[in-house]
Image (tube, rainbow, N blue to C red):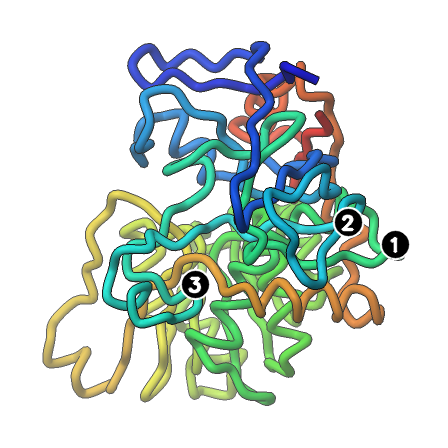
Amino acid sequence: MATMRAARFDTSTGELAVRDVPVPSPGPGEALVKVAACGICHSDLSLLHGAVPARLPVITPGHEAAGTIAELGSPMPGFGVGDRVVLAAGRACGQCSACVSGAAWDDCLDLRIMAFDYDGAWAEYVVVPVTALALVPESIPLEQAAVLADAVSTPYGAVVDTAALRPGQSVGVWGLGGVGAHLVQVARLAGAVPIIALDPLAAARERALELGADHALDPTDADVDVPGRIRELTGGRGLETAFDVVARAATIRQANAALGHRGHLVLVGISPDSVDLGPAAEYAVGRHTVTGHLGYRKRHLEDLVTLVAYGRLDLSRSVSAVLPLEEIKEGVRRLESQEGNPIRIVIRP
């Protein structure tokens, strides 16, 4: 095929349209992947709204993808045409000190992000480095494999790496959309107890309880002292780890107030709001720490593929809808409006 269908976003006009474009060719160390499924993420909305800039004036969005290898730019041990794969959404810059020293691509100090720095996978085909690929067994539907590449891997990285969560630790999760719902599942898998889920939407709270949360609260309930209620639910100790997937000023303050002594606040969400932790003396006395978190490592994808394949992690509820590429605008609208309280809406090119 000389051309393919791809959703193209013009950063100058804000127009998103599905167009015919040339099929890209893989270079040495790269693979051309026929996209089977690609998720729609809140990060994509940030791109479309101009909150997060793209490196290119016109770009193909989409960074949660899975598919099959259509062509290899050069022979690569362990991979062949027809292999089912999930795509890590990053490539090394090749110029920073980490890259020059031979570090792994996900240690790059200026990592390029798919759909923001180079064309993504709201398209029939996409070119990615072979080092970004993880093999997917036949037992995992590719629609489920696609959401591993952010909606599951980002919270997984936050839990196992950034928070270094240990069994028995108390956890709070603010925001129960695609990332937050999976964070609840991963925290339970890691042995967190109790897990307290917070979201203004009753349906999101109910779903979090079904996915493994022990308690669910409305963080906007004016009749409830939410940090006080969290202390009650944790035996007066407060949270050991709070994951804020929303990262707005109000949720940051509330999550910090719910921490116990030596508690850890992990900011998984991205927003333009400033981080206001209150008086420095109070913060210092509580020995709180706050850490930002973004993305995941290649090994996290490989871990998750194994966990799903062995039935330790159930993603059967993770794909809320599957739409054709031509309906990408409808998918974006549903996510923006939260119609149907989706975990992930997936595009099938």
Instruction: Return the disc, 2 or 1, that comes first in the chain's sequence.
Output: 2
| SS at circle 2 | strand
Residue nearest the viewer, comparing 23 with 208: 23
With 168 as the anchor, is 113 left or right in this view? left
Mark 3 lies on residue? 106
**Residue 342 horizontal/vertical position (percent):** 66, 38
Number of residues whose C-alpha sits closer than 10 Å to that of mark 2, classed few (under 14), some (14–19) or many (20 or more)? many
Instruction: Answer above or below: position of 230 versus 292.
Output: below
Which residue is located at x 36 percent, y 61 percent? Answer: 267
Q: Quadrant of the N terminus?
A: top right
Instruction: Return the disc, 1 or 3, that comes first in the chain's sequence.
Output: 3
Instruction: Answer above or below: position of 216 versus 144.
Output: below
Q: Quadrant of the C terminus?
A: top right
Taking the view exactly as shown, the residue that stands out farthest to the right is: 139
With 83 as the anchor, is 172 left or right in this view? left
Three-letter amino acid code at the position of disc 1:
Glu
Mark 3 in CB contact with mark 2 (< 8 angstroms): no
Mark 2 in CB contact with mark 1 (< 8 angstroms): yes
Three-letter amino acid code at the position of disc 2:
Arg
Instruction: Return the disc, 3 or 2, that comes first in the chain's sequence.
Output: 2
**Distance from label 1 to label 3 (Cα)?**
27 Å
Mark 1 lies on residue? 138
